[in-house]
Amino acid sequence: MRIRVLLPLLLAPALAACGQDAPAAPPSSESSTAPASSGSPSQPTPSAAEAAGPEPRLAVSYDGGVLVVDAESGDVLLDQPVEGYARLNPAGDGRHAFVSAAGSFTALDLGSWTEAHGDHGHSWTADPALTDVTVPAEEPGHVVAHDGLATLFDDGTGTITVLDPFRIAEGEDPLVDTVELPEAHHGVAAQEADGTLLHTVGDADSRSGVRLVTSTGAELAASDDCPGVHGEAFAGDVAVVGCEDGVLVIDGRQITKVPSPDDYGRIGNQAGHESSPFVLGDYKSDPDAELERPTRVSVIDTRDASLRLVDLPTSYSFRSLGRMPNGDGLVLGTDGALHVVDVRSAEVSRSIPVVEAWREPLEWQQPRPTLRVVDGTAYVTEPAHDRLHVVDLRTGDITATHQLPHTPDEVVATAG
C-alpha cells in the first residue's frame, strides 16, 4: 500500500462537516465543486488586550451557525452563520477550533489564550473570528489533536492533512504534510511530531485495520484485525483505536489486539488522558439494533492490553464520554447525571446530577446533551431548554448556567 505526498495546502473560503460515531454529513455540491483558491494564512491578531487572568471560552454549534461564548458570564461574543450542518473539533493549541460544514475544515479563533513565561503566564483576549485557514474536503471527517499537531481526515478522498495549529495565530502557513491514501473511507489518522503517521485502512465498503508508517511512507507496523475500525484516543503516547470486536493498542511499533468479551462488542468512541494509562470507551453489543442505547462502557488498560466493562445505571450517547482531572472516566447519562468511573476498579464511584433526563434521538445529527471537559471543568449542554451548564468537577457544583440564543449541538471549550 503506497502513500503519496501531495502538493502544498490550498486555502479556500468554504466551511465543512466532520463525522464521529456516524457517517460524515454530505458535502454541499456547490462548495465541493467550486475550485479551491489559494490564499495567505491568517495574520497575527492586532487588537489583542492583556487580561487579568485566563478567560475560558466556548464554541457552540447550532443549526445555522456557531457561537463563541464567554464561559464565565455566558455573553455571546460571536454569532457566526455557517451553511450546512456544522461540527466542531479542538485544534489542539488551546485557542482554535476547527469548524466543519459544507466542504472544508476552517479554523475558528476563540480569541483567548495564555502565554507561559517560566513560573507565570500572561493571558490575552481578542475578538473571536473565523479565520481564512481552510482545508478543502469532500467529506470532512475526524480531526485528531495530538503531539502539537492537528490531523484532518477527508472521508471522501482519503486525503490526510496535517497542520501545526500554533502557527495559525502567528500568521504562518500551518501546513505540515498532506498524504493521500489509496482508498477513501470513513477513517481517522494521527501524526507524531517526528512524522510517524498512524492511519486506518479501508474502502467505501469496509474498514479493516491500521497502518503505522514513516514520513516517507515506509511501513513500520500494520494490523488488519480490526473490523469496522472507528475512533481513536491516546493514553499518553499510546494510541487506542476501536473495532467491532475490541480495540487495537499501538505502543511504539507494537500493535496488540484486545478482544471484546462478546463476539460483537463495538468500541467506536474513546476518551484518553495525557497522564493516565487507561482509555475510556463506549461499548455496544447488538449488531442488529437500529440504535443501541448502551448501558456499559469499556476501560482499556494500555499497560497490559486488558479490557473491562463497567455497568452504568443509565444509557448514554456518543457525545457522553470525558475524563476527570485525575484520569478517572466521566459519562453523561440519559438520566441527566455525570457518572464518574474509577478506571482502576472499573466501577462507578459517584454521580453528579446536571440536566433533566433525556432520550437519545435516532438521527445522530439531532442535538442531545453533550459533554466537553477542560481541566477541572465540565461543560454540559441541555438542548431541551437551550442551556449550557458549567460544572466544577472537584466539588460537583454547577457554578453557572447560561441561556443560549440557539439550541446547542456540539461544544469545544478552551481554558483561556
Image: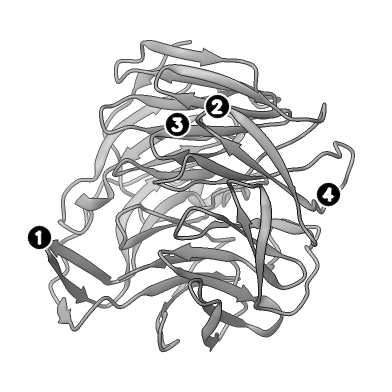
The mark lying in front, picked from 2 and 4, is 2
Residue named by callout 4: 292
- Regarding residue 40, the answer to whether it shows in the image is no
Q: How many marks?
A: 4
- Tag in front: 3 or 4: 4
Check disc 4 and report its element: helix, strand or loop.
loop
Residue 159's disc number: 3
Label 3 with label 4: CB-CB less than 8 Å:
no
Disc 4 versus disc 1: distance between alpha carbons?
49 Å
What residue do we see at 43% from left, 51% from top? 105
Callout 4 crowding tier (Cα within 10 Å): few <14, some 14–19, many ≥20: some
Q: Is residue 9 visible?
A: yes
Q: Quadrant of residue 196?
A: top left
Query: Which residue is identified by label 2?
Result: 304
Q: Are marks 1 and 2 in contact (CB under 8 Å)?
A: no
In the rendering, at what x and y percent does residue 30 appear? 53, 52
Callout 1 amino acid = Gly
Alpha-carbon span between mark 1 and mark 2: 37 Å
Point 82% across, 26% down: residue: 263
